[in-house]
Image (cartoon, rainbow, N blue to C red):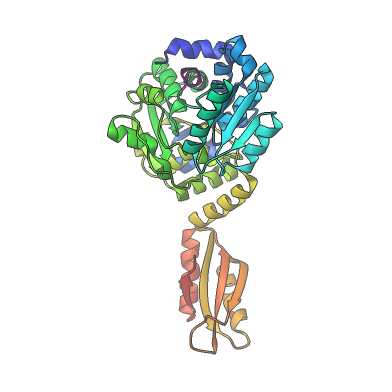
Amino acid sequence: MVTFREIEAARERIADAVYYSPCRPSIPLSEVAGMEIFCKLDNLQRTGSFKERGARNALAQLSPDQQTRGVIAASAGNHAQALAYQGKLLGIPATVVMPKFAPLVKVNNCQKLAATVVLYGKDFGEAKAHADLIAKEKGLAYIDGYDDPAIIAGQGTMGLEIVEQTPNLDAVIVPVGGAGLLAGVSLAVKTLRPNAKIVAVEAKNVASFSAALEAGKPRKVAMHPTLADGLAIPQVGTNAFQIARPLVDLSVTVTEEQIALAILRLVELEKSVVEGAAATPLAACMSGKLKELNGKRVVLLLCGGNIDPNVLSRVIERGLVADGRLCRFTAIISDRPGGLADLAAQIASTGASIKQVVHDRAFASSDVSAVNVLCTVETRNHEHLAQLRAQLKSHGVETHDSK
């Protein structure tokens, strides 16, 4: 079991190599969430995530002989990058095994940091099994990304900083994958601020911590696709779960739609680019599941910013859809001259903006005088969208939702 003293020792050990990230208040997010929101910006670390804390602490404690032979880890990306970067600073060779679905930006960054990158398996579990085999064959030290005591202690340094940076702290919302961050931060915060609430948040599609709470011990869960790829761990760590379980006050899950909307809010309001895992704390605040924190001083852990730009563009569009600001529907209009112009005029009269129009004559109704028009339209919000639909209906335009 990791102790608070080990977290304090880790802080001294990593001080010269890990960024003391800001934890600043956010007025716009506070207005959205109904809480006094502070954002711990560990997405500003050199490799874009909090993982550098644990990686540096673990690497610094290896024997000289093991440092020479090198280390290996399985990771969806952030732990791999942290290990590669901190290993490079210390002159320790690093090999990382990443699932084949790992974001390209994370794969490329690891390669740029001189790590040996192995792509293997469809998920983290398969990647880890392969990494274990390589470790035995080559005599490499396996550095577990979330359950190694040195990793947990290193991640806990974020909790020390949060307490220093946020007077009168009421709650901390922590993303959960393997639970290493949750264990370290909850231990640090609860030791210094026993009355502060610890809220664990995970993606509904990869809710391994909830499964462990229900079973009373870590157990594997089925993996489903998620925007929060950094949380896609099939089973929480044994050490991490033992530490975190008695310290966590509340555990909630968020949907993919809520994560996408939270990413959009952070880009627009906080001017912060984050990956799906880092958006889950805000998603939890906006989900309606944390009403007991209304008006309270709450810290969100923006733990990583390594999102693929191509994924980000798609996520932003999904967020706009969830927000009622982008919609697509099929309108059935007359195929005679002026039919499309009239549709466009009705849409424009409500203040909505047409982004794209596609005619579909071949698969329209049996009425040869009618045509289906697939419309992608930008609106202000759900209320504005409802007004647009009502306007079209009042003018006899039949519409259907399109996926």
The residue lying furthest to the front in this view is: 137
From the viewer's perspective, is residue 335 above or below residue 382?
below
Out of 237 and 296, give the one closest to the viewer.
Answer: 237
| Residue 351 can be seen in this image | no
Question: In percent of the image, x 50 and y 25: which residue is there?
Answer: 144
Magenta-highlighted residues: 148-152
Predominant SS of the magenta segment: helix
The question of residue 150 being in magenta is answered with: yes
Question: In percent of the image, x 46 and y 50: which residue is there?
Answer: 257
Q: Quadrant of the N terminus?
A: top left
Q: Is residue 320 left or right of residue 190?
A: right
The question of residue 85 being in magenta is answered with: no
Q: Is residue 190 left or right of residue 318?
A: left
Residue 284 position by quadrant:
top left
Residue 288 position by quadrant:
top left
Question: In percent of the image, x 59 and y 71: which residue is there?
Answer: 348
Out of 165 and 75, give the one closest to the viewer.
Answer: 75
Q: Position of residue 118 (x, y in %)?
A: 61, 35
